[in-house]
Every structure is written in structure tokens, then in C-alpha cells.
Image (tube, grey):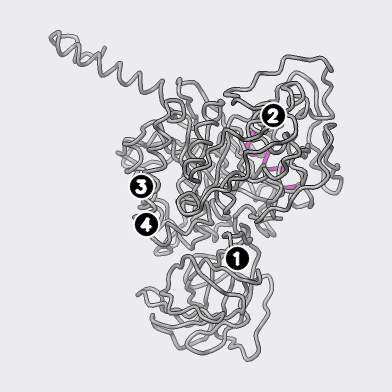
Amino acid sequence: MPPVCRSCNVLAVFICASAILLLSFKSVTALSTVNDNLLDENGNPLVLMGASWFGFNNGATMVDGLWNPADAFTYDFATIIYRWQLLGFNAIRLPFSMQNLYDVAPINKLSTQCGSIPTFSQIAYSVVDPSAKVAANLSTFPQPNNWPTHSPSTCNEYLPQNTTIDRFVWVVKFLANAGFYVIIDDHTEDPTVVNNQTQFMSYWVDIVTRISQDPVARKRFIVDILNEPDARGWGWNVMSSLYLQVMDTLYPINNNLLFFVEGCGQGSFGANWGDGFQTTGINPGSGNDPNPFFQGLFGKPYINQVVISPHVYGPSVTGASSNYFGSGLWTRLSNSFGYLTKTGYTFNGMTKRFPVVIGETGSKFQIDGDLKFLADFKSYLLNNGSAADGLHNAIPNVIWWDWNDNSGDTGGLVDSTWYNLIWIKVEYLNALGLTPWYSSASAASPNLTPSSLPSPSSSSYPSPSTYPSPNSSPAPSPSPSSSPSTSPSSSPSPSSSPSPKGASSSCNALFQLSTPWSNGQWPTSSINIYITNSASSGTMPAGWTFTMSNAGYVAQSGTWNFRLSQLSNGVVTGIADQSWEALVAGGGSVNIGLIISSTTGSFLPKSFTVNGKACTISTFSSGH
């Protein structure tokens, strides 16, 4: 007991001891962190190994893939989750859209007659790597946690059918009671935060309150506050205060929460969307300085609940042409977030180290550039070999993007049958620490040698012959690692420069298009536009107008850095009238953007004008 208590009276001793007990109770009954380590609800070290499974974000009103009633292996939700458990996953990330949860009625075709529910043994052997030598009669697999009651040959009868928010909350509670840590992520498709931040906060309060009513789930779910703010054109100048406001609001509701914080707006350092925590070398006034966020954390009661969660992808997603392998990759990652695990962040004489969870990474394992990236990224996470740069500690926590086959840029952990596992991906995660139920058996290591990619193996269980196509195909959403510089005096180099007829060489409009998703009616995309005045003289003051035309443009669900005047007959008209939006001659650049729907699925405009003058249109690669 501290010296101050040695001579205090009985009441004071009781109060002091009670305070110590309270602190001890908190430390062993809530998720938390110490230095760069996660702690579980019992105060033990925790490593998260998981994957994302989307569907609550794209109008499906349930995780995707539950499409073929003939096959319970791929149709029954509890059966699929048991496969996850047997593969060794202990975490699942659920992307969602607040708009979907509260405004879209649930699809109620999921509780139905289906193929026979497989036995636990059949399920266990469905996730055995074909290269592993496992005895046919091995029966040491774990039983499922929280297995729901099934009527004969009936799938998903336990799923709520009343509202989508009720179904989402039920899924989170079910997963938590099945032994998973559940990361809930307000994803890119959701326009709520752009349209109404008050509503955004209100929805977060409601979601957290509902889930926290379950005594198990309240200790096992994690809030990923906002997916890739860069996709909305937001940098740290916006997100520092928004992150702190959300945590200020939600922590009193449930102090067991961990908060995942994603990076934003540091394309000038080669960071893709969701990455970008570098605190040095920031261009003053760029809006991409995370120092105010980190400094704002000091003194907050939830500082030990904050987890850094960057998204990291290879060149097939980002379009990067450099710094995606070897020392270039390792230096970039250490400068962005690796340093936070080792030296931490110091403010007013206090230093805080942070745990890092890779919130998204993934690949189809199909191009040489990705194989180089994956091999060297693995070394970085394990902190071994040449990747052990002395600037970061090992990072064992990884959330793979994703389970879904219908992920455009990366594909999924399952193929188009939603049954067959893509073993090279599973083996890659095994090398990072994913431990399947048959872990004592020997299995193959992933082959990451460029140009010698093995074909995915199929499991022995017969696959259904036909599967319906998904109603949408979102992909992961990182931007290119060569994404635009935040400096107002420069703009990024486009990968191609189609010039419309009569375009002015002094006005350049660079378009960054996300992979489209369906809003339930039309294909929809997030568009960032970087407008540069390359004229040697003639600054355009704030208040300039622009038009962009594409016959398919039909609706918008959010804008940033401009006022929308009109969207009619495929033409968007807007005004950029904030004081800082002058287009300075000699290379001054301004970023605007919007989330737009197109009847044709085409999003690049046929023309773009500023103050009535045509601009050169160019594009560069993007993610989702």
C-alpha cells in the first residue's frame, strides 16, 4: 500500500483499498492495452487474428454469401462461423453502413429449408489444408461455441427478421458469445458522417448502447470509428476532433471498448487510404498533421483504449510503383506507424506507446509486385531478417480483407463457391500466427516466389453447381500509395491524361475513383478531385464554379469542400467558396469530392470545367 495510507484511519484505509480493488477489477474485466500490447478482458496478452466479412454495408442487410439454400455449408451462418473458429480466427470485422442499418428493411429470405446441416466432424475436416497430414480419425477438434438450435434441414432460423439494426446487433452478440472479438466498422459506403455528423454521433451511441446490454458482448467488441477518411477527402484537420469527439461520447457508455483509429490524408508520404500517422516533416497548413490528435489523447481516460489501425496493401490495389517492397516499404511503414510501437509519442514529457492492428490487408496473390510486397510485409510484421530495422516492434495483429469472394480488388479467403478455401491465403496467415485446430500437423508454407504461384486447392466436400451472383461487389478501399501530395503547391502525377477537346492546359482535374459498390439501386463511387491551376499567372479566388458531366450521373449522397448547386441531366454544378480554396497560379491545387451514383456504372466525367473553361482530365489508380 502507498506510504500515504500507512497512517490513515480505518475509513481512509477502506476507501484506499477499495480504490485499488476497483482499479484491479477494471484491469481484469475490460479490453485494454499496455504499451504496444493488447490485453483481453482477463488482463492477459491478446493477439487478434481475423478477417472482414462485409454485407451490412452494401444493402444486403446481412453478411454476404448466404445465397444458396442447397448447401448448408455456405448458407447457414452458424456453420460458417464454426469454420472460422476451426481455422483459428478469433476476430471478425463487420463493415456496416448506418444508412443500411436504420433505413433499409432486412432481406427476410434467409430462414429456410436447406441442405442437411453437416456434422461437426464434417465441418472440421472442411477446413483442413490439403497439404497437411491429418489422421482421418482425428477427433480433437474443438466444439462450436454458442451453437444455436437448428430444426432439421433448416438454416438461419435464429436470425432476427424484424429490422436490420436488430439483426446486426444480434450478429455481434452471437459472435461475441461464440468466442470472437468483433470489430464494427462504419464503412466507406455510408454517407451519414458527411451529411449529418449529429446523426452520426447519435447512431454510434445507439449501436454501442444496444450491444453493451449483453454482458459478454460488452467486453468483446471494438469500435472502428470510420473507415478510410481519405475516401471522403478528409485529413487529420477534420478527423482529429471527430475521433476525440466519438471517443469522448462512447467511452462513458462502455469503458470496455477499444477504439480503432485509422490514418488519413498522407498520400505525400506514400500512405494509402487508412494509413498515414507520420508526425514529422508535415507541410504546415496541409491539414494532414496528426500531432493535435495524439496530443489531445493525453489526459483522456481512454488513452489506453486507443489502437492504431492502418490499412496496408500491395501494388495491385494501390497502383504503387515504388516503396512497396524491401527497405522502401519498411521505412515507409516505420515512419507511418511502426515507430508508435517502439518509441511511441511524447508530449509534455510523457511518452505513450500504442499497439498496432493491421485493419486491412489482402491480395489475390496474382501479380509479382504483390508477391514481393507480401513477402516483405510478412517479414516486417514478424520483425525478422532485414525488416528488423530497430524502429518498430513485431506487429502480430492482422485483420485480412476479406472472407468475401465478391471483393473486387482482392478476392476472398473463399472462392466463388464460398466453400472452397484459397489455401495460399490461409497459409500466409498461418505464417503470421493463425493457428488452425489441427495445428500439430505439418502443412505447406505459402509460396511467395514471383511467377511461380500455385493454384488454390479445393476441399473434398462437393461444391454446389450454381451460385447466384452478388448484388454488389465492393472491394477494399485503399488509395494508391502514390496518392496526391497534400502540398498546395504541387499535384500528383497522373497515370494517364486523356484531354477533352478544347481543354485548357492551365487547368488540370485529376480524378481518384474508388471501386464502385451498389447502394441498392445504382452503382455508386467515392470520387476525389484534385484541381490544379498551372497557369503562370492569374490566381482564381475562392468562389469559383465547376461543372462535371456524365450522362450516367443520377444522385449524390455526400460532398466535401464545395457547395452543390445542382445535379441535373447528368451534370454536377458546384461552388468552391471556402476562404482557402483559391486556385493559386503556378501550381496551386484544391481537393473537392463527392459520393455519386451512376446509372451506367461509369464515373469519369466526359468534361470538367472551372469558371466555364475546360480542364484536362486525368486519373490515377485507386482502391475501394
Looking at the image, do the residues carrying marks 3 and 2 touch, with CB atoms under 8 Å apart?
no
| Image point (60%, 55%), residue name | 478
Which residue, given by chain and number where applicable, does mark 4 sit on?
197
> Around disc 1, counting alpha carbons within 10 Å, would you say few (fewer than 14), some (14 to 19), or many (20 or more)?
many
Give the extent of the magenta segment.
Answer: 372-382
The C terminus: image quadrant: bottom right
Using the numbered discs, state the Cα–Cα distance from disc 4 to disc 2 in whole angstroms: 39 Å
Residue 179 visible in the shown view: yes
Which residue, given by chain and number where applicable, does mark 2 sit on?
87
Using the numbered discs, state the Cα–Cα distance from disc 3 to disc 4 in whole angstroms: 13 Å
- Left or right of 553? Residue 340 is left
| Image point (60%, 24%), residue name | 147
- Percent from the top left, x then y, of residue 167? 51, 40
> Around disc 3, counting alpha carbons within 10 Å, would you say few (fewer than 14), some (14 to 19), or many (20 or more)?
some
Residue 394 visible in the shown view: no
Mark 4 or 1: in front is 1
Which residue, given by chain and number where applicable, does mark 1 sit on?
522
